[in-house]
Image: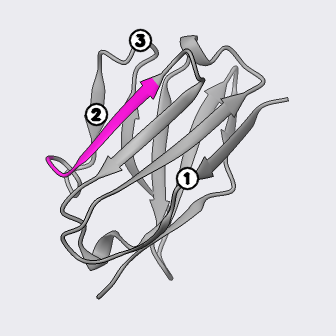
Amino acid sequence: QVQLVESGGGLVQPGGSLTISCAASGFAFSSAMMRWYRQPPGMEREYVAAISATGRIENYADSVKGRFTISRDNTKSTVYLRMDSLKPEDTAVYYCKVSVMTTDYWGQGTQVTVSS
């Protein structure tokens, strides 16, 4: 079955950096577009970034463009999100998502807190 497991979240100071990971299994990872979303406290889940199956095409929400970088390692079936210049408003639970056939699959999320 499809599994997505996020890791690497934590507490970071404003201006700091953090890289989170999403390990995938149960589907053809190297053929799948992968996406990151986040859900700030008390708010709806929002799109963050996406990366094509080959890794050659990336897309970002305006709110993170220039600060976040999505990448993937198809040999490890893992997608990453490097977050630089973090702001308090980046505080959220971060989720990875994949669409397989007509079904969306989500991980359990990893908490990122930006605070001094």
* Image position of 54 (left or right of 105): left
Comes first in the chain, label 3 or label 1? 3
Q: Residue shown at 67%/48% (left/top)?
A: 107
Q: Residue shown at 23%/56% (left/top)?
A: 84
Q: Is residue 98 above or below residue 107?
A: above
- Numbered tag placed on residue 95 in the rendering: 1
Q: Can you tell which quarter of the image residue 86 is in?
A: bottom left
Chain part drawn in magenta: 66-72
The residue under label 2 is which amino acid type?
Answer: Asn
* Image position of 104 (left or right of 95): right
- Numbered tag placed on residue 56 in the rendering: none
Most extreme residue toward the left is: 66
Please name the residue that numbered disc 2 is placed on.
59
Q: Kindly state the secondary structure of the residue where label 1 is placed.
A: strand
Whole-Å distance between the Cαs marked 3 and 2?
13 Å
Inspect the magenta stretch and tell me whether residue 68 lies in it: yes
Quick one: label 2, few (<14), some, or many (20+) residues within 10 Å? some
Please name the residue that numbered disc 3 is placed on.
54
Q: Quadrant of the N terminus?
A: top right
Q: Kindly state the secondary structure of the residue where label 2 is placed.
A: strand
Residue 24 in the image: state x and y as whole percent: 66, 32
Could you say which is closer to the camera, residue 74 or residue 43?
74
Comes first in the chain, label 3 or label 2? 3
Residue 8 in the image: state x and y as whole percent: 52, 56
Whole-Å distance between the Cαs marked 3 and 1?
21 Å
Comes first in the chain, label 2 or label 1? 2
